[in-house]
Structure formats: C-alpha cells, structure tokens
Amino acid sequence: MIKSEGMNAVRQLKAAFPGNVILADMKTVDTGALEVEMAAKAGADVIILLGSADNSAVMDAIRAARKYGVKLMADLISADEPAKRAKELAEMGIDYINVHVGIDQQMTGEDPIKLLKRLKLNVPVAVAGGLDAQNAAEAVLSGANIVIVGGNIVRSSSVTASARAIRQSIDAPQVLEKQEKSIEEKTIELLRRVSTPNISDAMHRKGAMRNIRSICRGTKAVGRAITVQTFEGDWAKTVEAIDIAKKDDVIVIYNGSPHIAPWGELATLSCINNGVAGVVIDGAVRDVDDIRRLNFPVFASSIVPNAGEPKGFGEINAEIHCGGQSVKPGDYIVGDDNGVVVIPKERGYEIARRAVEVEKNERRIRDEIKRGKTLSEVLYLQKWEKR
C-alpha cells in the first residue's frame, strides 16, 4: 500500500483510526532518519526497517525515532545469521524484532516459527510469514508477543471469519498433533486443491501442454511422471510402464501419431488396479466409451478406433516431449478439464504453494464481483494499466 499510495496511506489510516497503533512497514535499508521522519509525520506509531540495513542506517533511524516519539521494528527478512543479527539489533536499541519469512521464501518451505524458537531476546518479538489460525497458535506458544497475519485474512472468502478465528487462536492457543508429511506428499496434496489455470498463472503462463484434452470430463490427475517414449501405435512400452508405476504416478506417453492408438480400455483397467493416478498421451486413444464408463483420467490429442502392435520399441523413464513440453521422470503432472500442465520436480512444492495463493486471490476477486463490482473495478485496471 505504501509503495502504491505513499505516505497518504498512513495519513488516511491515522485519520480513520486515531486511537489505534499504525505501523508503517517502510522496510527502510538506507536514509534511516529521513524515512522515519517521513512516516512519523504522517502519523505512524511504529516504523519497520530491514534488519539487514547497515548499522549506520539503523542508528540514525533510532535517533530519529527518539526525536519524533515513535517505535522501531526491525524485520529479519533475508537477514544473514538472523538470530545473531536480532540480538545485535536489540542491543542497539530497536524496540521490536520481527521474525519474518517473505512470501517467496514461504513458497520454498521456509518457516518463521523455526527461527522464532531459537531467539532469546529482551524485547518483544513479532512473527510473520504465511500464518493462519493453527500456526498463529504455535507462534504464541513459541514465544511471539505479536502475530502478523496478511494473506490468510485478506485473501479469505470471509475476512471477518478468518480474522476472528486467528484472534481466538492467539487468545487461547492450542496446537493439534499433526503427522509430518514428506515434501512430495505436501506437494501432491496442494496440487489437488488447485486447477491447471491456477498452476499456469503461478508459472507465469508456462507449462501447459498443447492440443491434449481430457477424455473423461470431470476427472483430475495429479502425480509424478512415469515417462514413455514409443513409436506410432507401438503399445508394448506403454503397457510395461503400468508395472513400473507406483500409486499416484501419472504415465506420460509420447506416441507421435494421432492416427494409431497405443492405449485403450484394457490398459486403463490395469492402471486402475495398480493405483495409477492418470495417463497423458501425445497421440491417440481408443475404446473411449469403455474408458468413460471407468471414469478414469485419460488425456490425449485424438480419438481413433485402431490400435498398433506391441513391437517393444521405445524407452521408459527417459526425458520426452509431450504436447510441446519437456517432461522428465518425476516431474509433477496435473490434468483436468482445462488441459494438462507440467511442473519441474525441483520446483514442485514452490509452484504448488504459489498456485494455492493464486486460487485464494481469485476467490477474493470472485466474492467482490458477487457483491456487485465489475472485474475491471476489482482489478483497478484503468488505474494500473500503462499510460
């Protein structure tokens, strides 16, 4: 808000809520005194600077804060040796320390509560970074004096209900026992919550296969790729891949022909028995009436009646191209009625987290449209478009 509207945002809030503490998240890293003065005169009561700022900037900010009667909070986001730096900042005279994991760090699995548990300071400690009702309670029990929540309120379908749940969690914190899951399990769980358009947006419109469509409308496939490179109509390797695939894997096939099918009903039935999550074919499929009765997630570029022969040419678990996308063994595959997207395995968890944030934001926009706004109004298109 400060970046888009400047100090007027602080002035407006102070005018609207004169009895409340207004915190200006300036993230100051240079000209400490200048930015503290600017925020203080606009009505801020607490001003945030970056913990990674040079000591000279920190000390000048402290002097200005004392002059104008405001408090300073240091944000540890991206600070080197954050526990050590927090101690130094407290000794210099900073009023609050904010243990903060930024949005991009959250997407890769960073957790502010892990750092919070390591801190032993004589100043109040705030914590921020992807907190919801459950981990807000954990933060309080881990020593946080202040809990900062952003996205899980403002992107909620009911801002009031979410804020109330978090407030109650802070006031009466309880942490439920939870079974620790692997990154792969967390990634697949998150990807099941989102659509392929959400994922495409999270990947900056990348990853979507071309001309590959769902055969069974309403089905969804999420899993790790077992890749198959074969030749026109040769279905030997495609069937052998079923025996290699584990539960929740997706078989991804490059067949190279829209006229001869390497896949049909019997292979689909075998997949169901083995717990395979779905099949994606850059090529043809047949027996679609039977496959639709089985209601199994199959995605292909065409439908034909004729199959090829099991000659045995090709390779399993090599890098392939499918629908114009490179697919490596272990990449995450998601398919639904919109199409199929490929997520590189090394970015799986990050993209899954980002896609969930996209879905939350779309839900908020949808709610505002239902209340009567147009899409253009919700997105402030005229305000933000290039002049």
Image (spheres, rainbow, N blue to C red):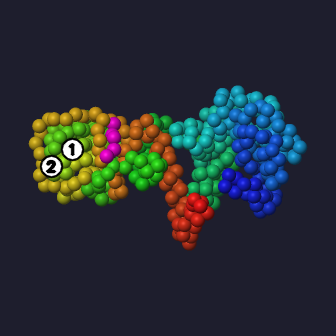
- Residue bearing mark 2: 260
Residue 57 position in % (x across, y down): 78, 36
Which image quadrant for residue 118?
top right
Measuring 75% from the left and 58% from the top, which residue is drawn there?
A: 8
User: Which residue is rendered at x = 33% and y = 40% of the image?
Assistant: 327
Give percent across and percent down for residue 64. Answer: 85, 42
Foreground residue among 5 and 173: 5
Picture coordinates of residue 61, whole percent (x, y): 81, 39
Q: Quadrant of residue 139?
A: top right
The residue pinned by badge 1 equals 255
For disc 2, the neighbor class at 10 Å (few under 14, some 14 to 19, many from 20) is: many
Range drawn in magenta: 324-328
* Residue 223 placement, left or right of 106: left
Q: Nearer the viewer, residue 377 or 31?
A: 31
Q: Main secondary structure of the magenta part?
A: strand
- Are discs 2 and 1 less than 8 Å apart at CB? yes
SS of the residue under disc 2: loop
Q: Which mark is residue 218?
A: none
| Residue 5: quadrant of the picture | bottom right
Number of numbered markers: 2
